[in-house]
Image (spheres, helix red, strand yellow):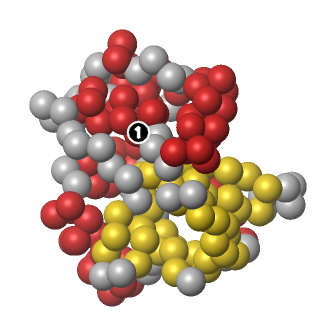
Amino acid sequence: MGQQEPGPEMGGDQRPASIAEKESFSSGGRRHWILLRGSWGLAVDRVFVWLTSYSLITKQYAVAQGHRYQPTLMLSTVGARSGRKRTACLPFFVVDGDWVVRGSNGGGATDPHWVHNIRRNPSVFVRYRWRSRSLKAHVAKGDERERLYEKLCGMSKTTVAYQMMCAPRELPLVVLRP
């Protein structure tokens, strides 16, 4: 049960442009399995992650692709332009004691808003397992990124697929540390 191959419906550069195309790519072509979607789905998921540390959205994409559930955290950043608190629920990986999140944006052409926010202000709040904590975040570069990318490829089949779909942009790997 692999990733859907990018087709002509995804535009000239083969990357998903619309939300529907991102959902189709991220669900391995099984978009009909995605029940929680849109702003109401994200709101429901945020409440559920806050209360349980379990993401229904992450679960539905994992089931659609035939993968196992990936632990999910709630990341709060400060908006780069607005200065307002922005929150995203993101699957994460533990690599050498660090928490790492991928800025895939569903394989889209641009980095997700939270990556831009971290580049502007690396102080973030993370909620996981009923605890909130202040952390520092940075986008991995150079040797650190290469090392993390290799490890993530071994931990998740979707890492390579997201990098290929994101190309020519580099898939941001964001490290979260105390």
Which residue occupies the extreme top position in the image? 32
Q: Residue furthest left?
A: 1
Q: Viewer-proximal residue, 161 or 176? A: 176
Classed neighbour count for the residue bearing mark 1: other residues with Cα under 10 Å, few (<14), some (14–19), many (≥20): some
User: Looking at the figure, which quarter contains the N terminus?
Assistant: top left
Q: Secondary structure at mark 1?
A: helix
Is residue 37 visible from the viewing direction of this image? yes
Residue positioned most to the bottom = 143
Q: Relative to 105, is 39 on the left or the right? A: right
Residue 57 occupies quadrant? top left
Determine the residue positioned at 28% across, 54% down.
Answer: 159
Q: Tell me the kind of residue under disc 1.
A: Thr
Q: Residue 67 in the image: x percent, y percent? A: 21, 40
Mark count: 1
Question: Against 152, is 145 above or below?
Answer: below
Q: Disc 1 designates what residue? A: 58
Could you say which quadrant of the image residue 25 lies in? Answer: top left
